[in-house]
Image (cartoon, helix red, strand yellow):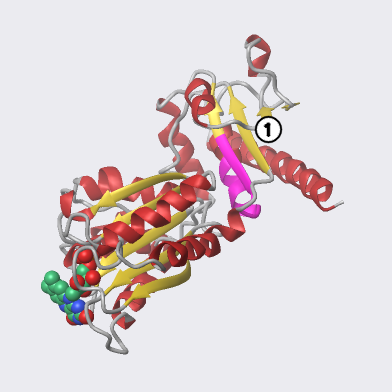
Amino acid sequence: MLAVGLQGSPRKGGNNSHTLSLFLSHLKEKGFQTETLHLSQMDFSFCIGCGSCEKTGWCILKDEFASVIAPMLRRAEIVVLASPVYFYGPSAQLKAMMDRGQMFWSRKYRLKLSDPLKKRRRGYVLSSAATSGQDLFSAIILNSRYFFDAIDAAYSGALTFREAEAKGALAARSDTQPRVASAADVVAGPLLPVKHRILFVCSDGAIKSRMAWAAASAITPGTFQFGHAGLAPQETFKTKCDAWMEKKKTDIRYAPVLSLKETLETTSPDIIVDMDGCLSKTPEVTPHITWDLPPTPPESDEEAISLMRAVESRVKKLLGTLNSNASS
Ligand SMILES: Cc1cc2nc3c(=O)[nH]c(=O)nc-3n(C[C@H](O)[C@H](O)[C@H](O)COP(=O)(O)O)c2cc1C
């Protein structure tokens, strides 16, 4: 479970830096992996409105939005935007980042691709301002809501602070920490407590396990967490698999190819599904469930489609059983 905070203030150690760090620390205590991106220290350009992403689904600008921010937005289940009010709107850094999100808008609305995490991802806003005007946060919240829609994050609210001008203004208030912590609890609520951590493992790691991850994530509530890994992950199969999944309008370009070893270093699954019997050669990892899907990659589009169907039907059956066990 990844929670990403995008810190839009250029002021180091300022109010939004402070509230975002409290928010993410609280989520970390609840078991989230957390990442903070300080936008003013990152190297990314403004959107140039070229329209390329509307045709291809990709941004032509190759910078840290493409290499760092976009993958994190896609992998996160919680996205927090933090920004000071600048002239009744978000900081330029945050707005520039939002504009680059047009790529995700295009993938969703032009190419009609569906993100497997779309029913789980949640978006939240933190903001502060010096004065006490009634409409101070209206623009930030409206911008954020449209951005969250583009990245498939359900808007889950905003915590705003008025009359906070000086750098340490919010750090000095005794109610800041409890307010931020209860906001973080609200956002994380639908993802906790985690009922199952299920890891799908297959021989190649780039095809079946990523298909299973996508199918499972798309149909199950956030309290079930899914991982995917391969015994000998092969990057070469990734592009093919991504293209097959896109035929079904499922967007898994940002699901990385992971090895079993690195996955087990960061997660502790309670259910390991061996999708093709590959773990029979790995005595140190014992699967809880073994499927009999073909160990070799599909050789044609037809074979890939039938594999996708077979994966989906097994995933649905497994989750149906786990859900009925959980509710009985
Ligand atoms: C360029 C600039 C524009 C600002 N515009 C507003 C504004 O329109 N209304 C307001 O109440 N505060 C405004 N402020 C004050 C900041 O929103 C406020 O100090 C905020 O808490 C700073 O957060 P930070 O410490 O995270 O940077 C502005 C500050 C700057 C530097």
User: Identity of the amino acid at label 1?
Assistant: Asp
Image quarter of residue 141: bottom left
Of residues 69 and 279, the one drawn nearer to the viewer in this rendering: 69
Q: Is residue 1 visible?
A: no
Q: With respect to residue 243, does 127 lie above or below?
A: below
Residue under pointer 1: 270
The kind of secondary structure element at disc 1 is loop
Of residues 30 and 222, the one drawn nearer to the viewer in this rendering: 30
Taking the image in four quarters, ligand 1 sits in the one at bottom left
Q: How many labels sit on residues?
A: 1
Residue 180 position within the rendered picture, expressed as x and y whole percent measured from the top left: 43, 63
User: Residue drawn at (44%, 23%), measured in percent from left and top?
Assistant: 234
User: Quick check: 116 left or right of 47?
Assistant: right
User: Quick check: 79 left or right of 69?
Assistant: right
Which span is picked out in magenta?
213-227
Q: With respect to residue 63, does 265 lie above or below?
A: above
Q: How crowded is mark 1: few (under 14 residues within 10 Å), some or many (20 or more)?
A: few
**Farthest-out residue, bottom:** 134
Image quarter of residue 228: top right
User: Residue drawn at (63%, 32%), measured in percent from left and top?
Assistant: 269
Image quarter of residue 20: bottom left
Residue 256 position within the rendered picture, expressed as x and y whole percent measured from the top left: 43, 36
**Farthest-out residue, right:** 328
Q: Is residue 207 rendered magenta in the image? A: no
User: Residue drawn at (49%, 54%), measured in percent from left and top?
Assistant: 115
Residue 300 position within the rendered picture, expressed as x and y whole percent measured from the top left: 53, 32
